[in-house]
Amino acid sequence: MPLPLGESFREALAAADRPLAGMWVCSGSPLVAEICAGAGLDWLLVDAEHSPNGLESILAQLQAIHGYPVHTLVRPPVNDTVLIKQYLDLGVQNLLIPMVHSVADAEAAVAATRYPPEGVRGVGSALARAARWNRVPEYLARAASTISVTVQIESVAAVDAVADILAVDGVDAIFVGPSDLAASLGLLGQQEHPDVVAAVERCLAAATRAGKPAGVNAFTPSVARRYLDGGAGFILVGADVALLARGSEALAAAFVPASDDGPGASY
């Protein structure tokens, strides 16, 4: 039976009449991913750079999220041709590529998502969930149009090259990571430092001039609002693990005496 593929994140951004709000999914749990998928957010980012996610757990989360009205991006741990091929074959349609510092990095990311002669993606559609095992009509010819590539700007070098990175054919959007950007600026852990905020806003302005969407990570509501006012077209405003950590800490603060380390506490 011929099967269709869903709308890409590129298409969703183009059709949106407001910024799209999302959250990180970092637990590696399909159950948690499904809970987040039904929350009413616009998009989820399943992370494998700083989270315990391998191919099997990513596949399980894609299956858990499928059917909910939410777009899913997946971030691999590295901008690697082989790993990107495996993610695409799993059925990942929307990639967020980390640590893109230059035009060459951006071009490599795009090439990894295209079949020859436009790129270097290996051909295995008959074996792959991406093509629903060749149940998606003309998948090989249409694959590039179903995939979106967002590259992450998170270093001084990337900020300096942002206009040229935005001009790379096949880069659909940029996403600014203030944490690594702060570290690159010598301001480790100071994501809201004025110099970091200025660098983020420089990238947002460059994206506006280029006519491409820009997103940013911002867990603090006031900073998120500033970036949205500055032209961010999509934003991450929380993470599953952070919500659980802060929520469980709040329970402890409410019900465990401050002097009590809890039963059997040892660190």
Image (spheres, rainbow, N blue to C red):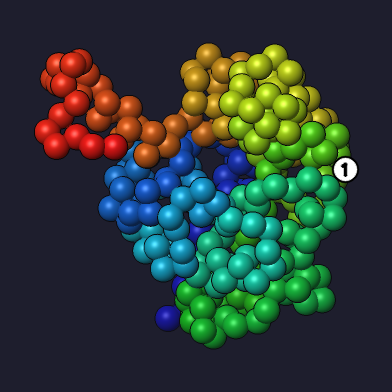
Q: Residue at x 48, y 74 (%)?
A: 129
Q: Looking at the image, which is closer to me, 114 or 194? A: 194
Q: Residue at x 56, y 77 (%)?
A: 137
Residue underneath mark 1: 164
Residue 204 in sight from this viewpoint = no
Q: Looking at the image, which is closer to me, 184 or 78? A: 184
Q: Residue at x 28, y 53 (%)?
A: 31
Q: Looking at the image, which is closer to me, 159 or 64? A: 159
Q: How many marks?
A: 1
Q: Quadrant of residue 29?
A: bottom left
Is 161 displayed left or right of 136 in the figure?
right
Q: Quadrant of residue 181?
A: top right
Is 259 displayed left or right of 213 in the figure?
left
Instruction: List x then y, in percent, for residue 140.
Output: 65, 77
Q: Secondary structure at mark 1?
A: helix
Quadrant assignment for the N terminus: bottom left
Q: Residue at x 44, y 32 (%)?
A: 238
Instruction: List x then y, in percent, for residue 151.
Output: 69, 47
Instruction: List x then y, in percent, for residue 54.
Output: 46, 63
Is 19 displayed left or right of 258 in the figure?
right
Instruction: List x then y, in percent, for residue 131.
Output: 53, 75
Examine the rendered structure and indicate whether residue 18 appears above or below residue 175.
above
Three-letter code for the amino acid on which mark 1 is drawn: Asp
